[in-house]
Image (tube, helix red, strand yellow):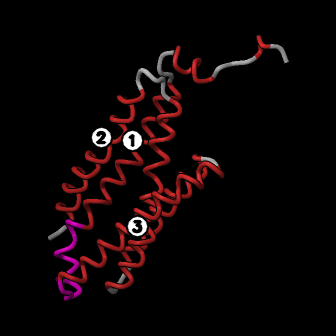
Amino acid sequence: MSQNNIVDVKAWIDERPVSGFQWLLLSLCFIIIMFDGYDAIAMGIIAPALMEDWGMPQGAMGTILGASMFGVAIGALVAGPYADRFGRKRILLISILCFASFSLLSTFARTPMEMASVRFLAGLGIGAVMPNTVTLVAEYMPERRRSLMITIMYSGFNIGSGLGGFVAAGMLP
């Protein structure tokens, strides 16, 4: 192979304007992070109603919220190395499936222990989403726009949290 056939992908990305594919990738990662933000706020908002329905003390709710955050931490720590080995897209899709499935299952929890268990498992997926979305956006964006694009993506978390507050408040009596 001659030297003329070698393409420097990083330079190629950096020299071009942001493409439609890159905007699509940013939009999808933004939406994923937005759901992450929604989930982060939703449990805090429904906690008082859940404690009343289940007649549980405040400490039990702390266990549920803590289990979720432990899941997030473990998911984030494990996802990066797995994504390096098996591919970011594959791990991101598995993470979304895990997050969505266990978040849905949490609506069927009937005891604090069941809720803590499914929230821990949902947290694994939620945590795994973070390192993979930021890495995908960083890898695909031109260097001159990278910081801005990552900032835009992460603003989805706050937008999701804000929307989550309005949605959850509207659903509670």
Which residue is located at x 31 percent, y 72 percent?
Answer: 66
How many angstroms separate mark 3 from mark 1 (CA)?
Answer: 19 Å
The residue indicated by pointer 1 is 30
Q: Nearer the viewer, mark 3 or mark 2?
A: 2
- Dot 2 falls on a residue whose secondary structure is helix
Image coords of residue 53 (percent x, y)? 21, 84
Q: Up-down: is 22 above or below 62?
A: above
Please name the amino acid that badge 1 sits on: Phe
The residue indicated by pointer 3 is 103
Contact, CB < 8 Å: mark 1 with mark 2? yes
Q: Up-down: is 136 above or below 87?
A: above
Which residue is located at x 49 percent, y 35 percent?
Answer: 25
Image coords of residue 97 (percent x, y)? 52, 60
Segment colored magenta: 44-57
How many angstroms separate mark 1 from mark 2 (CA)?
Answer: 8 Å
Q: Which image quadrant: the N terminus?
A: top right
